[in-house]
Amino acid sequence: MNLLEVRNLDIDYVTQEGTLKAISDVSFDLKQGESIGLVGESGCGKTTLAKSIMRLLPKNGVISKGEMLFKGEDIVKKSKEEVRKLRLKEIAMISQSAMNALNPVYTVGDQLIEGIRAHSNATKEEAAKRAEEVFKIIGLEAKRLKSYPHQMSGGMKQRAIIAMALTLNPSLIIADEPTTALDVVVQDKILNQIIEIQKQINSSMVFITHDISVVSEICETIIVMYGGKIMEKANTKVFFKAPYHPYSLGLQNAFPSIKEIGEELISIPGSPPNLMKEQNGCRFQERCPFRTELCQKELPELKEVGEEHLIACHYPEKVNEFREDAKKRETWEGVRNRLIEESVGEA
Amino acid sequence: MSNEPLIKVENLKKYYTVNKGIKDIFSKEKTYVKAIDDISFVINKGEILGLAGESGSGKTTTGEILVRLQDTTEGEITFDGHDFMTKSKEEEKRFRKEVQMIFQDPYETLNPRFTILETIAEPLKIHGMKDKDKIYDRVIEVLEIAELKPAEQYVFRYPHELSGGQRQRVAIARGIVMDPKFLVADEPVSMLDVSIRADILNLLKRLRNEMGLTMLYVSHDLSTIKYLCDRIAIMYLGKIVEIGDANEVIDHPQHPYTKVLLSAVPVANPDHKRERIEIDDEVPDQINLPEGCRFSPRCPFVTEACKKCDHTLVERRDKQWSACIYSDEELILKPSTNQ
């Protein structure tokens, strides 16, 4: 059964200079117990998407179209009070920087207990007991509940945030770059713990990151976003062996690996589209080395190219040719030269 | 690449005093944070040395000392045959010309009120170039080297009009405008998106290949170090624990800390099963350092003898030094620490 079904979601940010279409027409399903890795460049809409599931968008963020069915009920239509009840109990978020997520003037334990009591009928003692339990699971000593955030290291604070998210065994965990600010040894350990707990309580997870190697290690499914749209959705194993979308091919070239020697990194020339402007055709066409006239005119739909493998490209049948060419530096240099010519033309 | 050292660091120390309270201010005994504690290394001409380690290991401090943003507590540094610490004004000015730095955050290193032309022209003016046309030509030249093309389109723009990657290129252009001999790059790509990181790394590589620039690349990201650097030094709590050829160190780590660090790097290949070495992830207090080897409280191979370790670097493989008292073959995993 699908825990979450997102259908044709549009999210706009209303600003003084106009409307920014952060998410346009995004649909995907999340199964019970599944973990999806959401990757993409800054500004591609991944954090906006995650926040909208919790209905935590900033004031100028509007869900202008679409629905998000969580256990069959549309989150978009829920009242503030109803959404508040969902949070923490059903959907919990592990946010990016633990330093800003914890209140500096309360002990960590008090913050945990407050959360538990606000969303369940637990007494103070029960809540305190539960807080101790989750601290133990995540590898923190119970006496740390009495600490203030400033008395803890970055890793401990991030653990406390994770403990908080897990106190009520939520069915959906949203993790927004939970380990970005941490050292690699700590990151590795915490990621492992998140996955273990997620499996234990059989919750689903949306994991947001810009690091595709992390997704390869911990998620079953990967969604690649670009310019507010889904470019590719696939099983992680399939994706890393044989990505389809030209953007995914480009990302693979750009990523340094500790295991390989001598491979040359190639980046994707250009920058992401300005979503304040009207977009024509495929979002990636400006930086795509394989674009045609069709790509500039018509937006490609998400199409199935294999089992649960979706891509938004007009030319799925040319994938073998694309894969070959995408490995060559000249292919991407061509895009760079074209972009330079275009910018000269404009000026 | 020659084997002539451009920079030679000997027994470098950097201690910060800490005042914990009013008592400390009046007491004669000072407590220190030993950010860098007696490290020595050389960087050869035309070489890129990568400096890796956790936060608090002293890698950034080392970088800042090498561009003289910080003073040393003790130790000797020679730069291109000259004593690094000479304080005469002339020497200082010459030094500033030859050593440049690129910082992590391209959003904060550029003055928002300066155009790109003004930003890059500033060092030229300070070092006595007056002719406006010459300045303009030189700025165009370095912008093109930094691959901001067509350069004429960028010179009159302000930083807010540029993307993160473009800003980092401007910072690099400013860094190379004086034709320096040595460049310190402190996490220059960690704020950038993956799709443009490769560009900046390739640019730095090209600067070395074409201009013979010597570089210190400070980063916590071992994959980018492996891609860019010739040699790598791994730091832990103010000490160099391992130094050697970058590929060799990453493929055949000798020091337990290097092994742990490498086993924690995620790999973008779902079939690849990593062998994790698990350790306690809390770094010891930097003021009350452990006796002997600083890594010993967390080390999965620790023995009694580690209390006597003084971090002397031992050549364990060809030109690869480790500060562990044991060789690779002698390291035996303590059964209790690894699950």
Image (cartoon, coloured by chain):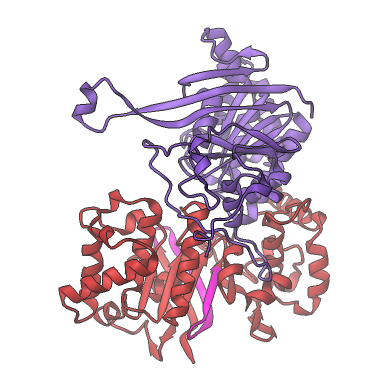
Q: Is residue A224 above or below residue B309?
A: below
Quadrant position of residue A197: bottom left
Please tell me in which quadrant of the rendered image residue B46 appears: top right
Q: Overall secondary structure of the magenta stretch? A: strand
User: In the image, is residue B54 above or below residue B274?
Assistant: above
Q: Is residue B17 left or right of residue A228?
A: left
Which is nearer the eye, A108 or A47? A108
Task: Name the residue nearer the viewer: B92 or A246.
Answer: B92
Q: Is B299 situated left or right of B27 in this image?
A: right
Q: Is residue A83 magenta?
A: no
How far across and how far down the image is residue A113, in percent? 22, 69
Residue A280, x across and y down, in percent: 62, 69
Residue at image point 68% right, 49% down: B329
One can see residue B105 in this view: no
The residue closer to the viewer here, B307 or B45, is B307
B104, above or below B331, in the image: above
Q: Which residues are magenta?
A: A15-38
Chain corresponding to red in the figure: A
- Give the total of numbered labels: 0
Would you say residue A30 sits in the magenta stretch? yes
Residue A343 x/y as whole percent: 68, 50
x, y percent for residue A232: 63, 74
Name of the residue lying farthest toward the front: B304
| Colour chain B is painted in | purple
**Visible in this render: residue B103?**
yes
- Please give the name of the residue rendered at 38% of the width and 28% of the height, measured from the top-left corner: B16
- The image quarter in which residue B188 lies: top right
The residue located at (65%, 34%) in the rendering is B314
